Each structure stands twice: as C-alpha cells, then as structure tokens.
Image (cartoon, grey):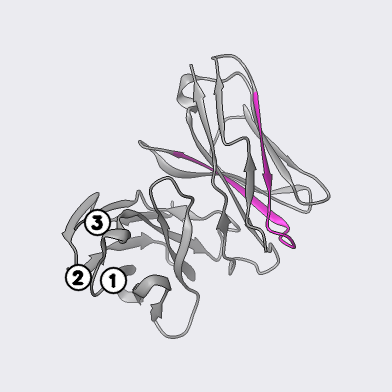
C-alpha cells in the first residue's frame, strides 16, 4: 500500500506571496491532518479534515487554511507569507473512523522557505 | 492545556549502550500514547503505540515503552543501541477529547557513536 505523499517537496517563496501544498493520504484513509514543524516550536497541529469538512483546528492564524476533496486528497494554503512561516509542513493520514484511537501515518513533508 | 514534555534535548550514547528516553504528559482523561522516530532526511515513522491493555508495549527495531499511568509517563527503552538508531524521537499523545489533534513533545535527538 502506498504511503502518504506530499507535493511539492521543496518550495521557495517570498514574503507576501501565497502557497498551496498538496497531500494524498493512504488509500482508504479519510482523515488528513496537517502539522508545522520548526526547530523552535517543534511539531504543531494546524487542522484536520475528514469527509471534506474541517473537523479539528489548531491555534494558527486565518492565513492558514485547507480543504479536502471527495477523494480525500487535501490541500493546505498559506496566504501573505511571512518569514516565520518557513518550516517543514507535514501531512498525516488516518482512517478517521476510530475516534481518538487512531494512528497517524506521516508523509515526507514539504519544506517551505520564505525569503 | 494538554502538553507533552521530553526529559532530554540531546542524548549521546556509544553503540551497545542502553537507552531510556523520558516522556511525560499532562492530561487527566484517557490517552493514547505514541513514539515516532525521524531518521535524518526521512519522514516521521511510528515506533510503537499504546491504546490499552498491557502497559509494556513492544515496537519495531527492538524498542519498547512502558506506560505508567500514576506518573503520566511513557518512557522509551532499548537495551542496546546501534549507530543506525541515530535520529530524533518524538513522544505524542492523543486524548479522548483531542479528536485528531496529536500533541507532540519537543523531541529528543539521539546520537549513537560507533
């Protein structure tokens, strides 16, 4: 079974631009979660989508948004990029149907550099 | 707010030494506990998990962890480390009111010297 895939793997943007990242979950998984990983803050939860609906949200500004398609693929968008948005963005998938007793499987991440 | 702490920021060991990485969480309800590993240049991989039952759980590559509810701890152990265990290790918690919001610890970097 193929794992979680994320595209692109690397991105360089400048301040003020916007960016869209993509994630394809493991086949059959319906939940996709997004995390931001930085050296200073570690892994921080952004949001989770299940059946095309945002089901859970972390404590990030509204510049960070996402969506999920009917095939469970998800995109994350960051508008008006700031230098502090430079990070590794991780996507994780899980079945989404086992309540809190889920195991998340992570993709390789998209490394975003904002100049 | 729920939180996860990991005792050590960076651990340096020689090959064949024993390993114990500490993890403590703060949450009063039912939790699921995980250890993930991130090898250099690779993505996060699940090492082991605890949902319920035997508090001593075994994972891949010879790792094990013990859940001690009274201490809110979930320490990771390995009796004899190898150079290939060099990686960053993350403890994570998902509580019964978290949804899919896993809370991760800050990570412990393990360097194993050959």
Give the magenta range.
A19-37
In the image: residue B76, left or right of residue B37: left
Label 2 vs 1, first from the N-terminus: 2
> Which of the chains bears the disc numbered 3?
B
Mark 1: which secondary structure? strand
Residue on which the image places disc 1? B77
Residue B66 x %, y %: 33, 76
Q: Label 1 vs label 3: CA separation?
A: 13 Å
Q: Residues within 10 Å of mark 1 (few under 14, many from 20)?
A: some
Mark 2 vs 3, N-terminal side: 3
Report x, y in % for residue B46.
48, 63
Is there one chain holding both mark 2 and mark 3?
yes
Between disc 2 and disc 1, the foreground one is 2
Given residues B39 and A30, the one toward you in this image is B39
Asked if the residues shown at circle 2 and circle 1 are in contact, with their CB atoms under 8 angstroms apart, the answer is yes
Q: Residue at x 49, y 25 (%)?
A: A113
Residue at position x 43%, y 45% in the image: B41
Q: Does dot 3 land on a helix, a strand or a loop?
A: loop
Relative side of B61 to A9, left or right: left
Q: Which is nearer the eye, A1 or A56? A: A1
Could you tell me residue A73's position as x and y percent?
Answer: 74, 47
- Residue A98: say if magenta: no
Are the residues under badges 1 and 3 in a single subunit?
A: yes
- Answer with left or right where residue A23 lies relative to residue B36: right
> Looking at the rendering, which quadrant does residue B81 occupy?
bottom left
Q: Locate residue B2: give its quadrant.
A: bottom left
Mark 2 lies on residue: B18
As drawn, the label of residue B7 is 3
Look at 55% across and 35% down and name the residue there: A60
Label 2: which secondary element: loop
């Amino acid at each position: 079974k193929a794992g979680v895939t994320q595209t692109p793997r690397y991105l360089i943007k400048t301040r003020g631009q916007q960016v869209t990242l993509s994630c394809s979950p493991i086949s059959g998984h319906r939940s996709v979660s997004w995390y931001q990983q930085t050296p200073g803050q570690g892994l921080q939860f952004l949001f989770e989508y299940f059946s095309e609906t945002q089901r859970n949200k972390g404590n990030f500004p509204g510049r960070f948004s996402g969506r999920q398609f009917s095939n469970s693929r998800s995109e994350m968008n960051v508008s008006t990029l700031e230098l502090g948005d430079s990070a590794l963005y991780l996507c994780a998938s899980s079945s989404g149907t086992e309540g809190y007793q889920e195991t998340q499987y992570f993709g390789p991440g998209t490394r975003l550099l904002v100049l | 707010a729920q939180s996860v702490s990991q005792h050590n920021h960076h651990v340096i060991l020689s090959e064949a030494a024993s390993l114990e990485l500490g993890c403590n969480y703060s949450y009063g309800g039912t939790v699921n506990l995980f250890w993930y590993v991130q090898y250099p240049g690779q993505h996060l991989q699940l090492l082991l998990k605890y949902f319920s039952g035997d508090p001593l759980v075994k994972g891949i590559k010879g790792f094990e962890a013990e859940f001690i509810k009274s201490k809110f701890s979930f320490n990771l152990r390995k009796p004899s480390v190898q150079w290939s265990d060099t990686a960053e290790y993350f403890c994570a918690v998902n509580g019964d009111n978290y949804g899919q919001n896993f809370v991760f610890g800050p990570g412990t970097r393990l360097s194993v010297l050959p």
